[in-house]
Each structure stands twice: as structure tokens, then as C-alpha cells.
Amino acid sequence: MDTVGVRDHSWGFKIVHVHFFNGFPMRLKFPVLRRSLFTYCALFLVSLVFMAGCINPATSIKTEGGATSNAAAGAVRLGFSAWPGWFPWQVAQEQGIFAANNVAVDLKWFDGYLESISTLNAEQIDANSQTLGDTVSSVAGGADQVIVLVNDNSTGNDKVIVKEGINAIADLKGKKVAAEEGTVDHFLLLQGLQKEGLTAQDIEFVPLETGKAAAAFVAGQVDAVAVFAPFTTQALKLPGSKELFSSKDFPGAISDHLVFTRKFVNEKPDQVQAVVDSWFATLDYINTNKDKAYDIMAKRAGVTVDEYKEYDGGTKIFTVEENLKAFQPGSDMTSLYYAAEKMSEFLNQAGLASTQPDTSKLFDDRFVKAYAAKAK
């Protein structure tokens, strides 16, 4: 997930407004850094979560620090997965920032990003960090969710990586290309093909969970792979491999958010506020305690601190001011309302959603506004 724009946090991440490619705000994700280990159903089948017999994704959740007991005490069940823009949640937990804001949080780590989405759709957690595109897709499938915060925008941490001998997008024609179907990285791949006048039919698409896609690429089983950090680091270990293009080439195509179930927002707005306050307090902590914060986030990502720092330029963390602007109605992609409408249209026209979801009630900026007022 990557972005461009004004630097606000001295810890390296960039801050920007939401921008979208070809009018389509997405990360049909994707997002994020940590989808590995588990092969799951394709994205856009999030609606299946509401059907009887669907696998319970909660069985493969990995949690830390007494999550079960916290949940029993009424803690906010917050899910997140591998992505640089979401690792700050780990800092919030380990540094007692949630407690400092008077909220108990059962922080749940998901090895598989798509599992976190389906678990939120099933309301087995109260909130999750996920992309705009995936959230719109969930709403199209029947989920009732609310976006209360913009975490970040991807500006390079989503990449299409190729083996030696492939030097242009046109060279992908007829090649085996792996990606997690329906994710933002799959979307990024399609955007790159479209840019050069190619279609999905021009390549041999190999649908694999992100971690397995990276492994297949390194093993020489496919010619190219579309993955997000930190799996980009893994893929680039293949001798002669290189980045062909990334989210940096498609500004604003992937934005990431804190998403709650509407039921939880309606019943416990004070806890939602406390989680939002904790997010911004965590960004302040990271800004003034870089070494400690980087150590925590790198450990959660499973990479070295130096490797983690390489992700900085590919993820733009949104400031309070950026959040306030993004939540305003508008007529271009800098507005989340407009972006969600375009995403809704895209999903419907592409046959990824049977109906065009109503996104008019998807956003609730009162929590960001309340924090901004207190911060002043």
C-alpha cells in the first residue's frame, strides 16, 4: 500500500489525500501485508459469509495477550493483518495506549487478510482494518458496516514483481502471473495490463493466497507475482527478479480504513471514539519513539528493522487533517463518498457484485471530528 504527498510524521510514512486511478478507489484487496499461510475463498465471495455452512474464519485467528479473557470482559474485538499502515495497532497494544484511552481492546491478528474481512462480515469481531474496495464489496454482499477512520494510502508497497527477462508490461503476455484473486494486488495487476492495452485473457492467471504466490514465484513456478509488503521482500529474493510496477504508479488506487459493524457503532459509540483516539495517540508515540516503535512493528511483520524501514515510502499514513478532508462530500476522488460510488459502480459493471451497493451511509466522521476538536 503506497501513497504520495506531504510528509507529516517524521517516522518516515508519507501523508496524502485520497486519489484514485481511473475513478476507481480500490484495494480489492488486498491490503495488506499479512495475508499468508491460509488459502481461503476468493474475495468478492464475502457475501457467502452470511450463508449457512460457511467456514468459520475465527478458527484460524492468531491472537496475543489474553484476547479471550478480554473479549469476555466486553473488550472491542479489533482485527488487523499484515500491512505497514496497520502495524501501529501492535504498538498501541504493547505500549498500553488503548488502556490510556480507557478502552479494553481484544486485538486479533489474522495471518490471512481475507479471513479478517469475512470474520467482520460474520460479526465475530467488532472492527477490522481493511481497504475501501473490500468494504464496499462487503456492503454489496449484505454487510452493514461503517468506515470511521482513514489509516493510510498505498504508495508503492503493492507491487508486481517479475523474473529476469521480463522488462515491460507487454512482456507479461502469455506468462504465468500469480496473485490472490479478488485482492487489491489482483486489481493492481489488472490496472497495469489495461494501461498497456492488455486484458486478463492475455496472461495465464494463477490464483494463489498472497504468501503462497510469493513462494511459488521464488520457486520458479510462475513468471510474475502481484503481492503487498512484506511479501514483496520475499518475492524479490529470487535472483534477477525486479519490480515491474507498483501502486506508486497508480496514486490513490488503494486506501485503507478502520471499519466497524454498524451495530457496534450504534450501541457503543464511546468505545469507537476511544479506539480512534488511540490510533492518533499511537501515531504521536511512533513519531517520538521511533526506535522502539520500529522494533515492535518489524517484529509483528516478521522482518528486520532495516527491511521494515524500506516500506516507509510505500505507505502514506493520514493525519487528522487528511482524514477530515477525505470524509467531506465532493466531486472527485479526493472524497471518500465519491470514491465509494465509483467503486460501487465498478463492482457492479464488472460483475463482481450482483447489485450496486448503497454507500451513502458508509462513512461516519464524527469520531475523527471529535478527536480533532480535543486535539486543538
Image (cartoon, rainbow, N blue to C red):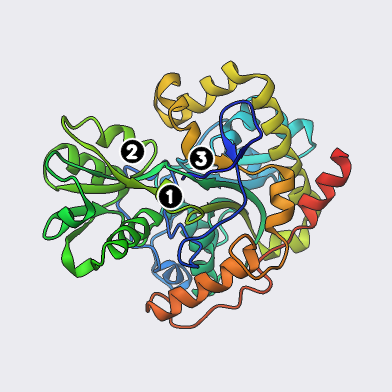
Q: Which residue is mark 3?
A: 315
Vertical relation: 47 (above or below) 1: below
The residue located at (52%, 28%) in the rendering is: 297
Measured from the top left, where is residue 203 in percent x and y? 17, 62
Q: Which of the two labelled residues, at mark 1 and mark 3, occupies the earlier sequence position?
A: 1
Verify CB contact (< 8 Å) between mark 1 and mark 3.
no
Measured from the top left, where is residue 365 in percent x and y? 75, 58
| 3D distance between C-alphas at marks 2 and 3 | 15 Å
Outermost bottom residue: 355
In the picture, residue 90 is in which quadrant?
Answer: top right
| Nearer-the-camera pick, 134 or 75 | 134
The residue located at (78%, 52%) in the rendering is: 367
State the count of labels: 3
> Dot 3: what SS?
strand
| Nearer-the-camera pick, 295 or 155 | 155
The type of residue carrying mark 3 is Thr
The type of residue carrying mark 2 is Phe
